[in-house]
Image: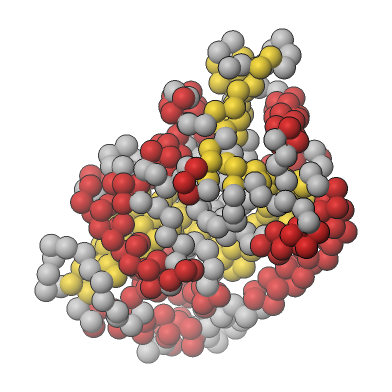
Amino acid sequence: MFEKLQPRYAVQWIHKIEEIPQAEWDAIAVPLKTPFLEWTWLHNMETSGSVGANSGWLPTHLTVWRDRSLVAAAPLYLKSHSYGEFVFDHQWADLAARLGVAYYPKMLGMSPFTPAEGYRFLIAPGEDEDELTELMVNAIDHFCMRHKISGCNFLYVDPEWRSTMERHGFFTWLHHSYIWQNQNFQSFEDYLGAFNANQRRNIKRERKAVSQAGLRLQPLTGEEISRSLLSHVYHFYADTCDKFGWWGSKYLTRRFFEQLYPDYLDRVVLFGVYSTEENQHPIGMSFCLTKGDRLYGRYWGATQEFDNLHFDTCYYTPIEWGIANGIQLFDPGAGGRHKKRRGFAATPNYSLHRLYQPRLSQILHTYIDEINEMEQQEMDAINQELPFKQTNPLEKVGDDC
């Protein structure tokens, strides 16, 4: 049912992305840097049972049309909890409870379970972005107030889009991710050369321990990836999540991974772990996605415990592959201060928030600058501990053993 807003545009809220032809959605999603807002990824989330009313992620996507052509869209979800977001607003929910205010449901804009930068409104090239953004914000405000939604939150936003939304009255909350950036490295040895001597030795020892355990790592892309390999990914993913119990974050179904075959293989990079004595089946694997000059680490697991295998499978071998394939930015996934020892700097990411309950909104307005300053101080402290070498002409990469 289309609701006329003005002669040029009409807005429609949809609950299944399959209501939108893939070609029309991807015409405005594929040009973005992120792969996580493309039709196949989001559609797979829904049809695999990973998101939906049962999981507390109800798709409520906003679309804008002109003459029955899709000109803008926003992947949105109504949430009845805060799990799977990796931006921890539980303190806001607790505060709301103490104030006697309902915090859930809330509206959320992000790619589900995917703490990777790049969320923004999807707007067709050549359209008036300012006009469409204002229209979409007004539509969201109207929807949320009409349905008594506590607030609208956009997570892991495109940093350029952030300033646009601040002009529309959204508050910015600063967070950090651990990101590797290619400093014009031409080889893995160049990457090692950025570290101080002690950490270079440490990385070499960690990789050597993996090879001495009789293991080899194999990057797999395109036609090298079978449906059965993607089923293996689910096994490793589920096993790793189960080890962490309640905090394991096991949100995706086996069907989700299997349905990536064959239509999304151009985005998938697997790093398989094989025993030199048994080449048939991987005993471990990391699952990554790539688009343009970016690489994203998502999940990993192994059937056996080996010293340093996690570091090699999730960091070193992807970096080595990335350097060889022109990757400039590698986001290995959420969490883990141990990443800083591998050259992943604490890098800002941002969420945007609008709370419709006046008391909560006032508290956010009062304290958000202080919260952001504390986060900036934490990032500065982390990055002062990065094990990069000091400028010293006497220190040579070859002085390791």
- As drawn, is 83 to the left or to the right of 139? left
Residue 190, quarter of the rendered image? bottom left
373 versus 263 height, above or below: below
- As drawn, is 52 to the left or to the right of 118? left
Residue reaching furthest to the front: 100
Could you tell me which residue is drawn at 29 percent across and 70 percent down? 302
Q: Does residue 390 show up?
A: yes
Along the line of sight, the residue nearer the viewer: 277 or 17 = 17
197 versus 121 height, above or below: below
Could you tell me which residue is drawn at 64 percent across and 74 percent down? 383
Along the line of sight, the residue nearer the viewer: 295 or 141 = 141
Percent of width and height locating residue 216:
23, 70
Percent of width and height locating residue 339:
51, 73
Q: Does residue 166 show up?
A: no
Could you tell me which residue is drawn at 72 percent across and 39 percent down? 148
- As drawn, is 382 to the left or to the right of 293? right
326 versus 188 height, above or below: above
Along the line of sight, the residue nearer the viewer: 373 or 383 = 373
Percent of width and height locating residue 141:
75, 34
Quadrant that contains the N terminus: top right
